[in-house]
Image: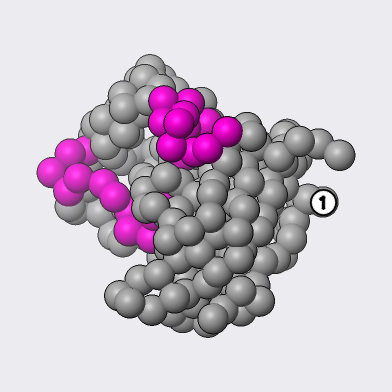
Amino acid sequence: MTSPLLEAVALACERDWRMLFENLELRLSPGDMLQISGPNGSGKTSLLRLLAGLMQPTSGEIRLNGEPLNSHRSELARTLLWIGHAAGIKDLLSAEENLRWLCALHRPAEREAIWQALAAVGLCGFEDVPCHTLSAGQQRRVALARLYLDSPPLWILDEPFTALDKQGVAQLEEHLAGHCERGGMIVLTTHHSLTRVPVGYRDLDLGRWAV
């Protein structure tokens, strides 16, 4: 069995004095795609933020390569790419400037690579356009263009299909599955019914760990 890159052990999360889940266990190895499901308020986004190191669990432990997550913050930045439900881009910057700024935090990208990534998400010709003039779907695609750059192996994505049209959804599905088939890993939430998934796909229903 392949050793897990990311592992949660006896994980519990409390928000606003309410326990969302406890004793949660998961393992993620190369090739895996894990979809987090459950009703609204069950803690799907909270779990993603825990796995991304953006929140601390109420109890339990998250391990990266067998070691506690918090002891490898620098390694986490090289291993993980987080894209939240919001696009997370700066309105006054152009599409290219946003990607340059985001990539500079961890993996600087050349202009040619950024333009190729924007073209891959259907934004050829929008490289220098200020993002406040773009539609919600176009802004979402600027954020998702990071997935087409030299990126870490583990992607944690909160509702990545939000505001995408039918063609954009199909293209993203194919790209996500391909990432896993090349040895990458994905944890995601989505209300979209996936039609293209890798062999390593599985669903984790938070209802199993609800309190």
Quarter placement of the C terminus:
bottom right
Query: Which residues lie in the magenta part?
Result: 67-94
What residue is at 68 percent from the left and 46 percent from the top? 28
Q: Is residue 59 left or right of residue 6?
A: left
Query: Would residue 163 be seen by someone viewing this image from the given angle?
Result: yes
The extreme right residue here reads: 1
Q: Position of residue 163 (x, y in %)?
A: 41, 65
Which amino acid, mark 1?
Answer: Val
| 206 sits to left or right of 133 | right
Classify 42 as above or below 70. Answer: below
Q: Is residue 126 magenta?
A: no
Residue 172 placement (x, y as % from top left): 57, 52
User: Looking at the picture, does residue 69 appear above or below residue 55?
Assistant: above
Closest to the observer, 134 or 15: 15
Identify residue for label 1: 199
Q: Total of numbered circles in the picture? A: 1
Quadrant for the N terminus in the image: top right
Tell me, yes or no, whether the highlighted magenta stretch contains residue 77: yes
Q: Nearer the viewer, residue 192 or 129?
A: 192
Residue visible at 37% across and 48% down in the picture: 54
The structure residue drawn at horizontal position 40% and vertical position 70%, both measured from the top left corner, is 14
Q: Position of residue 106 (x, y in %)?
A: 37, 25
Residue 101, quarter of picture = top left
Horizontal relation, residue 119 to residue 35: left or right? left
Image location (x, y in percent) of residue 143: 38, 46
Residue 119 in sight in this render: no
